[in-house]
Amino acid sequence: MARPPIERSPVTTEAPEAPLTTGPPPEPPKNPRAIAWARRRRSFGRVVRIYRRNGMGMTGLSILMFFLAVAVFAPLIAPREGLDPTCTCTGPPFQAPSLSFPFGTDDLGRSVFTLTVWGSRISLMVGFFATLISILIGSLIGIVAGYFGGWTENVLMRFTDWGLVIPFLPLAIVLASIIGPSLGVIILVIGATSWPSTSRLVRAQVLSVKSRPYVERARALGAGHWHMTTRHILPNVGPIIFANTVLLVAIAILSETTLSFLGLGDPLSISWGTILEAAFAAGASTAGNWWWLVPPGLAIVLVVLAFTMCGYALDEILNPRLRRR
Amino acid sequence: MTLLSVRDLEVEYATNAGPVPAVRGVDLDLRAGEVLGLAGESGCGKSTVAHALLRLLPEGTKVTGRVLLDGEDVLEMRLGRLRAARWGEAAIVFQGAMHALNPVRRVGDQIVEAIRLHEDVSEREAVGRVQDLIERVGLPGRRSRDYPHELSGGQRQRVMIAMALACRPKVLIADEPTTALDVMVQAQVLSVLKGLQEEFGLALLFITHDLSVLMELCDRIAVMYAGRIVEDGPASIVFDDPAHPYARALASAFPRIGDASDRGAPGGLGGDPPDPQRIPPGCSFHPRCPARFEPCDRVDPPLYDAGPGRRAACLLHDPMYAPQEARA
Amino acid sequence: MGTRRYVAGKLAQALLTLAFVLLFNFILFRVMPGDPIALLLRGSGAIRPDVIAELERDFGLDQPLPEQFVTYAEDTLTGNFGVSLANGEPVTQRIGDRIWPTILLVGTSTIASAVIGLVIGIYGGWRRGSAFDLGSLGFTLVAYSMPEFWFGILILMAFAGGVGFFPSIFPTGGYQTAGADLSGFGHVIDVLNHLFLPWLTLTIAYLGEYALIMRSSILDVMGEDFVTTARAKGLRDKQVLWRHTVPNALLPTMTLTFLSLGFVFAGAITIEYIFSWPGLGLLTVEAIDDKDFPMLQALFLLFSAAVIVANLIADLLYAYLDPRVRAS
């Protein structure tokens, strides 16, 4: 017996669209290592694509590119002689901004614009190298602790915890005072005091990688420590270290600024921190010489902001636990 | 009398990847004293339905249709009225597993909070009622002073049931209450629930993916797939003789102990439920359907009459497409 | 009892860390490259050998290293930090003279920072994506990227020195007006007047940290089932926020906020320097200039100990607030 349908009448729909493609298929790989690297190249490409869509990340990157260009092309933007107080290109001291001196002059008549441009070199350089040291120490400790576990891990993590507890600035001050003020010391001091956060992060990641099935299988097949570390651990820990690195550079630049400001840097070098130190010591704040104080500080804020934005963007993309937010 | 009546319920989540239609037109009826089971695999939208009934979905979610609670449309209620209806007229029991209860407050206090919110009673009287409720679900009254982590999974679940009944609602929605529990504890919780339902004459909507649980508890069963109801009818009939191929697969996946005809490997179903953003054309079940035939991939079946008091959304029951197969 | 074991464990850890810091401090000054005496006399030109020998005896440097450490440990535990090289006074005395202004400044600004920061974080997380949330996130990001002393310099310039249209309404530094012999209420007002700008700088510089931590925590908690249960019970949004979400979000925030105390000390050093606020921070900067190693050693120990104690308090507070920790 036929029954009429009692709800809505049937709906006819079209076939689904063709599946999305992501480019031409890769050529057939030759060996397992090539397969792994081909896959990593594809992931890298995917990360770049996602990053490009991240507004915060792209803004940060553009600011960074700008300052890197300023640092690299400094001689073309502002003549180096401008840093020399005896140069004839200097003007009257404590001058507010004018056409010939867009950021005004300091107590020696030097153009603050020139100082700020050249200051970028030291500030960025110290930031990079200090972070490099920090990352090397931190990653090494984190990988060794996570990989070997047991006693080694306990001892190393105990050191890391201590490193985290001791307040940074008092420690840096003490170290720099003993060794003597210089740029190298600052780089070393910042590097030697900021590795704990990296080692914590790296160890956590190593532990999670270690427990993955393919790693256990590799070990069952008799893979040695070197093989495990370089082929399995490092490639999986690499991205997180990279995101962490970017954030650390931001902190390193801030630290250099503070240490230089307190007089622990090289008094003869020009960095944004030493400019501020000289300005404050010369009474620029009470005298209202804002043009001497604002540009270097603003430069610091922008650069640190840029690194932080890039770091957060990378963290969002690369750190599996942060996806949701 | 029908206490809960849902018509054309549609829910669309707003996500970073675009809108996700989790519920695509659901009709339900729940009468006083009746137990209606809502079954389906994970992701079919049944939990979303439960949340939608009391407007508990996150902000930004699009909910359309009508949810008539004792005649009033929940979706149209003003906030003040909604808050009174919540718990006072309809209460929901979540999976008591880990964090359905506030970890830093004693369980008794959490129930007292519910009571004093809806009724003008003194603290003392509320505490007394809480003791009584705790005992009704089979726990010693002093347990109301415990923190959630001091209770086992089954005990927490029973506390959640006690809390749900605190304001004497007419409708109870149970969203996967036994899923995280092991079998023995499950039986305990189910018997408590059944007992209370009978005692208070509650209208109970029981949501789960475990069809065998529904068999013994429910009067009627509705089966959901990909955001829609694909079959509903009296419990025993739906389980013994399903009209929709999906319901049949679901039922056969649970072997019945003691039933000789059921011997042999339990049936199952290959494939996975569809991604809500990529629902197949025609009948949403057709890619996995063993009874698939020609029109299934272009015609989307509504719920057809499939016998006394039962419906199935399958073209096999449409006389136009399958005249010889349509059940009388 | 679980609590006693937990407290004992945390106490032991703190003491171990303190012991490590003590050892580290010792190694720093005795084992570091360079002869301690040479460090002291750097820049002083040639010194007669018998003076050097006497200095060595004074500092106990003619003893073997382990004995030196024992002496050092004994001295430290009895509060003897040696003599300041700047003016010959005992280090402990100079620290004692300067400790109150730092406590005043750091104490009041930390409290203000924490309270304002936490509230901003709560509302930002609760109304995620709103204009307030995005605005406060942006502000936090910028404040985080700014050297706190640069911000202090700008504030000093604007409100004390006066530049452009900014009025010069606050003193340019110091603890009290030099020469004015005020007492009682007048003195308090004078100090507060001098305190305001450094306090403002420190508060604004660090409230972003607290806001971010709290916001994170709130977002984590909001996703938990018990928040939905609270809404389902009929509580108003504000009640759900303050009675259920915030208490649970506060727990992890506690530990993290105490951990950030280390950063506040760093800030105090530079801020006190800028505002000539006569506290331990300014003392540190003076000690750098004077190459006053006994003073630097003592200050380093003091700062480290303060942070260790703060962490200990945080751990104990966490145990007190979270019933789950007490039970384990």
Image (tube, grey):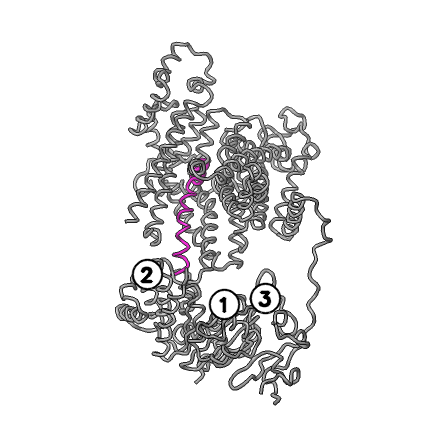
Report the Cα–Cα distance between label 1 and label 3.
Answer: 31 Å
User: Which residue is label 2 attached to?
Assistant: B106
Secondary structure state at the residue bearing disc 3: loop
User: Which label's residue is closer to the chain start, 2 or 3?
Assistant: 2
User: Which residue is label 1 attached to?
Assistant: B57
Question: Where is B75 relative to A256, above or below?
Answer: below
Q: Which disc number belongs to residue B77?
A: none
Q: Chain of mark 2?
A: B
Label 2 Cα neighbours within 10 Å, binned few <14 / some 14-19 / many ≥20: some
User: Which label's residue is closer to the chain start, 1 or 2?
Assistant: 1
Q: Is residue C11 magenta?
A: no
Residue beneath the point at 51% across and 47% down: A211
- Would you say the residues marked 1 and 2 are in contact, meaning their CB atoms lie under 8 Å apart? no
- Which quadrant of the figure has residue C237? bottom left
Question: Where is B76 relative to A58, above or below?
Answer: below
User: Which residue is label 3 attached to?
Assistant: B270
- Which quadrant of the figure has residue C11? top left
Camera-side residue of A169 and A223: A223
Amino acid type at mark 1: Leu
